[in-house]
Image: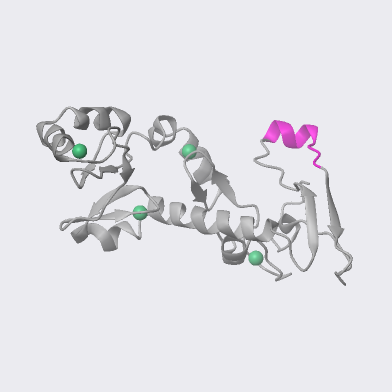
Amino acid sequence: MGNCPNIIANGTCSVSSCPHEHNVTVCEPCGRVFSSVNEFQMHITSKQHREGSSKSQVVSCPLCNLNVYGGPAGWDQHLTTKRHKKNVRASTAPLAVEPQSGITTAQAQFCDFCQTTVLSFHWNNHVNTNKHKSKENYVKYRSAVEDAEKDKNGVAIIGAFNLGFVGPDVATAGKKVSASITTTQLSHTKLVKIQLASSLGSKAKQSA
Ligand SMILES: [Zn+2]
Ligand SMILES: [Zn+2]
Ligand SMILES: [Zn+2]
Ligand SMILES: [Zn+2]
């Protein structure tokens, strides 16, 4: 069935018979959302995950106005190029040049989600790849969760209800979080019920 689109977009889902998965599996270091635990497990044994995203990350040089590939080593290499040195000499800007986010050029478009450049010709394919979608979903999901955590109608949440990633060992042993919900004097909100997002839907796993 895959991840619930409401959870991805809003951080919550109020459809009680929602058939989608509400335990969204994410890999924080890689910034990706997975539609199944299987997919996630395949990911964490992959080269992509072990090497992290830094190696393939694209940055750009603000002086040379071009993309630099190959992670930190590629950047160091760029600093030694003739073109760069010439631009440094011609520049009145501060001495240390910091790598910037990648840029879109005539041939290639920079993908903010993947932090990589994609030949314009391949762009339509790119946005349909699993990798791109999982990154895009991660960005949506993170901002939805952050919005959901913000104070609403004078209701403040102190502490966190976020259990983080719970592995099988921890799940067996049990995990506790504590947080309190308070309201400002002006708020007319009453706490009626607390429900885990993961306890909604027919595919819910009531592990917590
Ligand atoms: Zn749902
Ligand atoms: Zn990962
Ligand atoms: Zn440069
Ligand atoms: Zn992308």
Q: Nearer the viewer, residue 201 or 77?
A: 77
Q: How is the image coloured?
A: one colour
Residue 72 in magenta stretch: no
* Residue 186 visible in this rendered orientation of the protein: yes
Spot occupied by residue 128 in the image (x, y as percentages of width and height): 35, 60
- In the image, residue 71 sits, relative to residue 37, either above or below, namely above
| Image position of 38 (left or right of 149) | left
- In the image, residue 14 sits, relative to residue 24, either above or below, namely below
| Image position of 111 (left or right of 106) | right
Residue 170 in magenta stretch: yes
Spot occupied by residue 106 in the image (x, y as percentages of width and height): 15, 58
Q: Could you tell me how many numbered marks the image carries? A: 0
Q: Nearer the viewer, residue 31 or 149?
A: 149
Q: In which quadrant of the rendered view does residue 153 lie?
A: bottom right
Q: Nearer the viewer, residue 41 or 60?
A: 60
* Residue 203 visible in this rendered orientation of the protein: no
| Image position of 184 (left or right of 27) | right
User: What's the residue at 34%, 60% (across, down)?
Assistant: 127
Q: Quadrant of ligand 3?
A: top left
Spot occupied by residue 156 in the image (x, y as percentages of width and height): 79, 57
Q: Main secondary structure of the magenta part?
A: helix
User: What's the residue at 25%, 31% (across, down)?
Assistant: 74
Q: In which quadrant of the rendered view does residue 148 lie?
A: bottom right
Q: Quadrant of the N terminus?
A: bottom right
User: What's the residue at 66%, 36% (across, down)?
Assistant: 167
User: What's the residue at 40%, 53% (across, down)?
Assistant: 113
Q: Write down the region rendered in magenta.
A: 168-177
